[in-house]
Amino acid sequence: MSKVLFLNVRGHGHVNPTLGLVSELIKNGEEVIYYSYDEFKERIEKTGATYKELKADVFKRPNPGVTNKHKSIEQMLNLINTTLQSSESFIKDFLEEISDTHFDYMVYGASFPYGKIIAQILGIPSVSSFAIFATPKELIPDNKFDKGLLKDHPVMDTYNKFATNLKNTYGITIPSLIELFFNKGDLNIAYTSEYFVAHPEYYDDTFRFIGPPIYDRKEDLDFPFDKLEGKKVIYISLGTVFSAADLKVYDLFFEAFGNIDAVVVMTAYNVDTSNFSIPDNFIVKNYVPQSAILKYTNVAITHAGMNSTSDLIYNNVPFVAIPFGADQPYMASRAAELGAAIKLDVDKLSVEDLKKAVNKVLIDPSYYENIKKISQSFEHSGGYRKAAEEIFKFKQKLAV
């Protein structure tokens, strides 16, 4: 049995994909100490892991209510700059906290900027969990990253000072600034299939494509499922990070699908819906048991986050993608390239666009057939059990 240190950033899209893997590692005799945040405590403990609270936000995200899909690259760099300014104290405090515990290896979310750094300092093997599996080469063009701005921004001075101090203190070389947030380990787990990635050649032989992290999280299924029985069901979700980025979108949803012969289940995470006139055929909640809802769903509208896109494809649900940011443009574009979805531009969105797109993916059989091709590639990739198997092979190779 090995003792495993698990670290992750705050975010449903980063923590949820790891739960099946953690559960499988524990079933196979590993002891997992999972550092995260209290909002995820219950679901982490349900896997059998020991939960520990991270005392500080590693990467401070804007509140969902002020997230802006037009957030400039400069604002993002300002955020990274602020994060890095407290990085040395975070690492020092964390190392002190775990100083009495010996860990055999470490797993961390790829967006956790200090994962590889801490593994190097501890001198233990590392496994990176790629919830956002697209490479910087693929994400940066889609989000129009200005490399000239990066070169001239104060964040580079902060990063260089950080890198120099860690080199002097611990004798380690840290990843590049961009790679801190696409943080490779000695072994890398990507939650997709090789078929779905646009450029397999961008991934080296340390990557294992295990398909989506479909896992029964044992959620409270407090939902009026009886209202869905025998009905056409449209499911709408814009996720948790960008859910409040553009409230006008919700008015478009209500106008497009209000009072039609269908039940519309819509999540509005951390959105104040009191000012909206919600049609009678809508069920609007802060959070719903998505996997269970999809068993009833005929068609969906999604922000194209990794978890939601994978869930839709796995359940063979046709969908329309409205990406806002992060990896969503990549996910939406790739699904559209493979003929599995229609991608819409949120800045040009209209009621008519929504109606046409939803109707097209619903009645055109090619979307369903192409979704099935991706879904089959997911099934053949092995899931979190395959991920655990790869980790044990990795351990055996290193005699851990």
Image: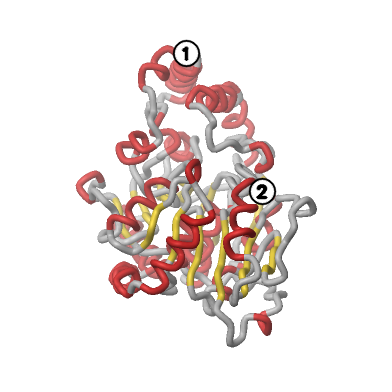
Q: Position of residue 180 (x, y in %)?
A: 43, 33
Secondary structure of the residue carrying tag 2 is loop
Position of residue 46 in the picture relative to residue 154 (left or right): right
Position of residue 347 in the picture relative to residue 39 (left or right): left
- Residue at the image point whose x is 38% and y is 63% from the top: 387
Placement of 302 over or under 228, stated as above or below: above
Q: Nearer the viewer, residue 214 or 64?
A: 64
Q: Position of residue 255 (x, y in %)?
A: 62, 58
**Amino acid identity at mark 2:** Tyr
Secondary structure of the residue carrying tag 1 is helix
Q: Nearer the viewer, residue 131 or 198?
A: 198
- Residue at the image point whose x is 62% and y is 61% from the top: 44
Q: Residue furthest right?
A: 274
Q: Residue furthest left?
A: 201
Residue 394 falls in image quadrant:
bottom left
Using the numbered discs, state the Cα–Cα distance from disc 2 to disc 1 in whole angstroms.
30 Å
- Image quadrant where one finds the C terminus: bottom left
Mark sitting on residue 267: none
Q: Which residue is mark 1?
A: 157
